[in-house]
Amino acid sequence: MFLRNLCLSAFIIFSVFITSESKAQTAPLLPSIAVGTEQAINFLTWNCQYDGIKSIAVQRSGDSIYNYLTIGYVKKTKQGIQSYIDGHPLPGKNFYRLYIAFNSDLTWYSNRVRVNVDSNTLLMQSMVLPPNDSLQKYISNDDTDNPLKEIISKMSFTTSYEADPNAFSYIKSQYIYTNPLTGHVNMELPDVRSQRYNVKFYDQKEREILDVPRVTASPAIIDKRNFQKKGIYKFVLRRNTTMLETGYITIY
């Protein structure tokens, strides 16, 4: 009977069960995010200080840097405490980040956060959970009789994951960047008719992958298939004979 009620009743966000003081401690200010896990259910939370947000995509990976896939979207994007429920995590390591798009077309990523889910816990999971997109509608439910109350109260939360020294993040270039909608590489360069621009791309072993001898149009698009596989690539942009910028793009 308990399991039946557990499956059918609304899923309540953990912040309902904790005091205002502990809520503030649990939900860090963006770009940091926090995650807790119990019985193979992961809860992400953060405090959003921004207005004018178009969408917040929750992305998950099993390897920290590469292969992030969008697993769902935050339903409510107004300022304040925001959360997301992942009821179908990966066995082992789960790395999460947010991809935030503003109405102004500015986009950026949050910090990453990591949580481990024991594979045996997944196998022993007795609850039949709906898909993640259906779970999100229960976040704001305030039914204090929800049987998840005890489960959530046992969670301890960790904040943004600090990458190892060999991992890195990068600031989006104003000239060369990955289009979040298409995955192709966009180049927007000033005065392409009067200036000679050359762009070279390298993999993480500093091997040259692609050479654009001269950019003759702006904006210009490089099809992501030219890079052959997903990953982070370094680029070197030269104007005439002078290096204008070096940076990174992500192919996904």
Image: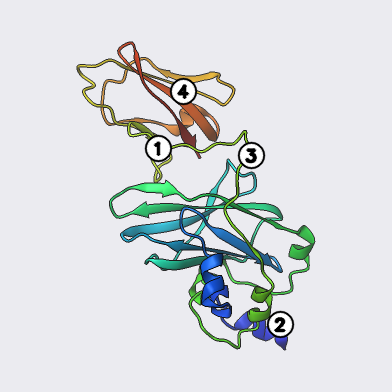
Q: State the image coordinates of residue 177 (x, y, percent, origin top left).
A: 39, 35
User: How far, Cα to Cα, is label 3 from label 4?
Assistant: 24 Å
Judging from the image, what secondary structure is the residue with disc 3 in? Answer: loop
Q: Which residue is mark 2?
A: 3
Say which of 27 and 75 sits in front. 27
Q: Considering the numbered disc 1 on the image, is that residue within a helix, a strand or a loop?
A: loop
Marks 2 and 1, how far apart at CA = 47 Å
Rounded to the nearest angstrom, the CA distance separating label 3 from label 2 is 41 Å
Instruction: Determine whether label 3 and label 4 are within 8 Å by CB.
Output: no
Q: How many marks do you count on the picture?
A: 4
Q: Earlier in the sequence, mark 4 or mark 1?
A: 1
Q: Are marks 4 and 1 in contact (CB under 8 Å)?
A: no
Mark 1 burial class by Cα count in 10 Å: few <14, some 14-19, many 20+? some
Residue 70 vs residue 123: left or right?
left
Q: Mark 4 and mark 2 in contact (Cβ < 8 Å)?
A: no
Which residue is at 26% across, 28% downward?
A: 218
Which is nearer the N-term, disc 3 or disc 2?
Answer: 2
